[in-house]
Amino acid sequence: MALTLRTDDELEKALTALAEAEGTSRQEIIRRAVLERYERNGHSARVQESSARLIDRCGDVLDRLGTVWATSSTSSSTTFLHSFAPCGPARFGMWVC
């Protein structure tokens, strides 16, 4: 299948440099970049779906663990994180800044 791609000077320079460095065509560089991006996005979606299932299944336990961890004043990392004003414990024991 044919496709026309308009490029600017920056993209031309990058494509040419990558193709020469890897000993392949500019078309192959673009193909690999698109497929890698597609794979990476698919991975992110799988992680999000898996996280949602875990939260549905174990959310109450994660909430309790997060609350216990966040209120502990003996942890030096907790004390360190409390020193940043906009940072704070979020749901499931993760820190949000």
Image (spheres, rainbow, N blue to C red):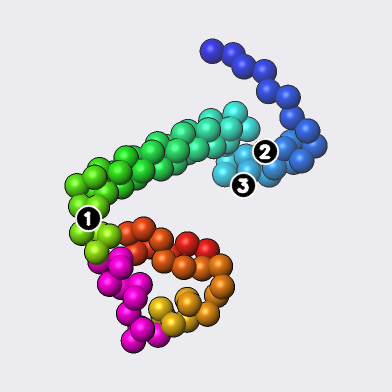
Dividing the picture into quarters, in which one does residue 92 lie? bottom left
Q: Quadrant of the N terminus?
A: top right
What's under tag 3, amino acid-wise?
Answer: Ala
For the point 24% across and 48% down, the residue is 54
In the image, taking residue 55 as reference, residue 26 lies left or right, namely right
Gap in angstroms between the C-alphas marked 1 and 2: 50 Å
Q: Amino acid at mark 1?
A: Asp
Residue 33 drawn at (x, y percent): 54, 37
Q: Secondary structure at mark 1?
A: helix
Q: Which residues are magenta?
A: 65-76
Q: Which tag, 2 or 3, sits closer to the chain's start?
A: 2
Q: Nearer the viewer, mark 1 or mark 3?
A: 1
| Residue at the image position 74 percent from the left and 29 percent from the top | 7
Q: CA distance from mark 2 to mark 3?
A: 10 Å
Residue matched to label 2: 15
Q: Position of residue 55 (x, y in %)?
A: 27, 49
Point out the tag, 1 or 2, that comes first from the N-terminus: 2
Label 1: how many residues lie within 10 Å, few (<14), some (14-19) or many (20+)? few
Relative height, residue 2 to residue 11 (above, below): above
Q: Is residue 43 left or right of residue 50?
A: right
- Helix, strand or loop under label 3: helix
Res 79 visible = yes
The residue depicted at 67 percent of the width and 18 percent of the height is 4
State the residue at coordinates (31%, 73%): 69
Q: Earlier in the sequence, mark 1 or mark 3?
A: 3
Helix, strand or loop at label 2? It is helix
User: Which of the two residues, 20 or 45, is positioned nearer the viewer here?
Assistant: 45
Q: Label 1, on which residue?
A: 60
Q: Are marks 1 and 2 in contact (CB under 8 Å)?
A: no
